[in-house]
Amino acid sequence: MKREFITKKLRAGKKLSESSGIEQKVETVESEKFTWIDLQNPDRAYVEKLAKQYNLNSLNIEDCLTKFELPKLDSYSEHIFLILHFPPLASSQFMPKYSQLSVFLGKNFLITVHQGDLKPLLDLVNICKGDFDPERKKRLLGKSTGMLLHEIIDVLVDDLLHTLRKIVANLDEIEEGVFDEKKSAARKISVLRREITMLRRIVNPLKRIVLETTKHIPRFSETDLTLYFDDIIDHIDKVIDTLEESRETMEIYKDTDFMLSTEKTNKVLAVLTIIFTLAIPATVIGTFYGMNVNLPGGIESVGSDGGYTTFIIVILASVIPAGLMFMYFRKLGWLSD
């Protein structure tokens, strides 16, 4: 009865996967010392089956099946449970969310659970399944689960460095846009600030979890892996320092773009204000005399000079005050470059 119940749940999970269009993939890698099981988009039934086989905590099962869970480390007598966050892909233009990796680490088993959007991890799985890189495969599978976990975190942190290089390149592009009056850099600044903020939210908890993992990893490795994990911490520190510098640089670019945009707007308003001010005398005189005197082209413009004398007087009365105002504004420096 129990086996039939599990089989029914597996079939139900498979139907749910097919209906939602999400591909479930299970990769099992066997070595002489341990087993590595990689689960991409797993269904609950299969994970619960593994939980019974390896005596995993039911609360951790819930956490690994949740797409968005806070980073954490839970330690038990025979295994530890990790939740780590990483950017989705270094090549993506926008990174609105993070990718979650759940890890069950024991002496003779390693289970990784993710949603299939961690390409460096998938590459490691392919290396262990194939024979095209035997030296790397031997290094991954030849020692312990602790060493394999180090390799997994290391490649994901290296991918984080690639994402960081992309952000630094975007900073250089934004710098050119900020000082180019023909381009608007406000949107690019906002998008890059969002990416930097998201990476800071990922990297700071990542460092804390890796530090805690270093304390527990001797239980699952015959080799001292302290130096290996210290190297990962150094890379994470480099990422944190670069993100802090990028954040400060973005604040400078944001203030500079705001100041330059304000200055440009003030220049436009100043030109329009001066034009309007210089046109005031002509507007007043033309409005008043245009309804009370004969001007060329009017109905009552018939006369000895056809109203041209009056027209010239009106023009002079409009131009002379405008000219005097122009000279006065220039003397004050309002019209200088």
Image: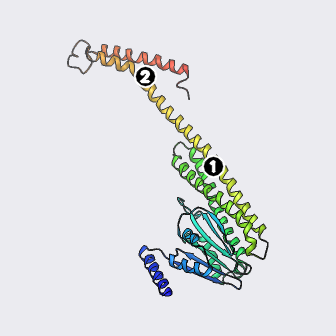
Task: Find disc 1 in the rendering and name its residue.
Answer: 247
Q: Mark 2 packing: few (<14 Cα in 10 Å), some, or many (20+)?
A: some
Q: Is residue 88 visible?
A: no
Q: Residue furthest top?
A: 304
Residue 122 in the image: state x and y as whole percent: 60, 74
Residue 198 in the image: state x and y as whole percent: 58, 56
Q: Quadrant of residue 48?
A: bottom right
As helix, strand or loop, the secondary structure at mark 1 comes to helix
What is the quadrant of the C terminus in the image? top right
Residue 209 in the image: state x and y as whole percent: 67, 63
Numbered-mark total: 2
Q: Nearer the viewer, mark 2 or mark 1?
A: 1
Identified at 53% across, 38% down, the residue is: 261
Identified at 61% across, 44% down, the residue is: 251
Task: Find disc 2 in the rendering and name its residue.
Answer: 277
Q: Relative to the observer, which residue lies in front, 269 or 210?
A: 210
As helix, strand or loop, the secondary structure at mark 2 comes to helix
Identified at 53% across, 52% down, the residue is: 191
- Disc 2 and disc 1: Cα gap in Å? 44 Å
Q: Relative to the observer, which residue lies in front, 335 or 177?
A: 177
